[in-house]
Amino acid sequence: MSELLVERSDAAPGVVRVTLNRPEKMNSITGPMWSALADAFREIGANRGDRVLVVTGAGGNFCAGADLLKAELPRTTGGRTEYMRGVARAAQALHDLPQPSIAMVDGAAAGAGCNLALGCDLVYASDRARFSEIFVKRALSLDFGGSWVLPRRVGLHRAKELALLAEVIDAVEAERIGLVNRVVAADDLEATVQAVAERILRMAPVALAQTKQLLDDSAGRSMAEALAAEGAAQVINFATEDSIEAVRAFRDKREPNFTGE
């Protein structure tokens, strides 16, 4: 049985689902799984047929983070350094995706699993989800991009509280502080994420990718730099067939049919 599932369905063309599949271990991630995640994200990023990514976990939990009990966890400095490079490659590959990504979180999202969820563009959680930056309780510091994404989600002081106290917070609190986009009943989570994915599928892929990049880069730019980047992005958008289709659809009072061209 594969520990990482990459699935595409004819019922929802354009939506690709990556599922962490170690339910007996709360989907904790082994060394080989970091490489598999990086490969999967890079492959999805290069596949024009994939329009939306959904990341989730099997068996009622999202991900409990790295599997620190696995025998292959490196014992040497060199081995540990290479292991962390594997973690970084997976996090960077997720961040570099041009397509919108959605974390569908049920149950536990802890440590690197929490940051895997937060690394997605949108986070939808069930009412039984729980989140924890548990690292310091394991004598570790943040990884999988947590030091970058967490303060951007909730602000610096709240990020320090979550990271330094390593508390477990429930879905209601996660929604209150802006860690997740929306909390729904567990039975409604699948349908909610599917509905969001279908809404994204109706948007123009190039415009989505440009918008995502502009927002991701915004914190490090001045207003002048942001305006210049916006202008360059619009020049690209204006040149697409989807831009022409958008005008035609507006004129004809119908929904546009975007193809990514």
Image (spheres, rainbow, N blue to C red):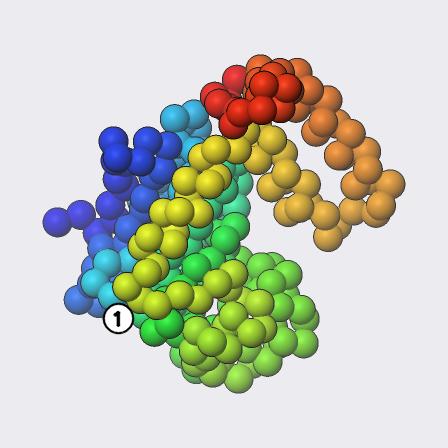
Q: Is residue 53 left or right of residue 239?
A: left
* Closest to the observer, 154 or 162: 154
Q: Residue at x 33, y 31 (%)?
A: 13
Q: Residue 70: percent from the left, percent from the top?
A: 24, 65
Q: Is residue 194 left or right of residue 200?
A: left
Q: Residue at x 52, y 46 (%)?
A: 95
Residue receiving disc 1: 69
Is 157 above or below relative to 207?
below
Q: Residue at x 25, y 48 (%)?
A: 4
**Residue type indicated by callout 1:** Leu
Q: Residue 114: percent from the left, percent from the top?
A: 43, 65
* Closest to the observer, 134 or 197: 197
In the rendered image, the residue lying farthest to the front is 253
Q: Residue at x 47, y 58 (%)?
A: 123
Q: Residue 119: percent from the left, percent from the top?
A: 50, 54
Report whether residue 198 is seen.
yes
| Secondary element type, mark 1 | loop
Label 1, residues with CA under 10 Å away: few <14, some 14-19, many ≥20: few
Q: Residue 93: percent from the left, percent from the top?
A: 47, 43
Is 181 above or below relative to 196?
below
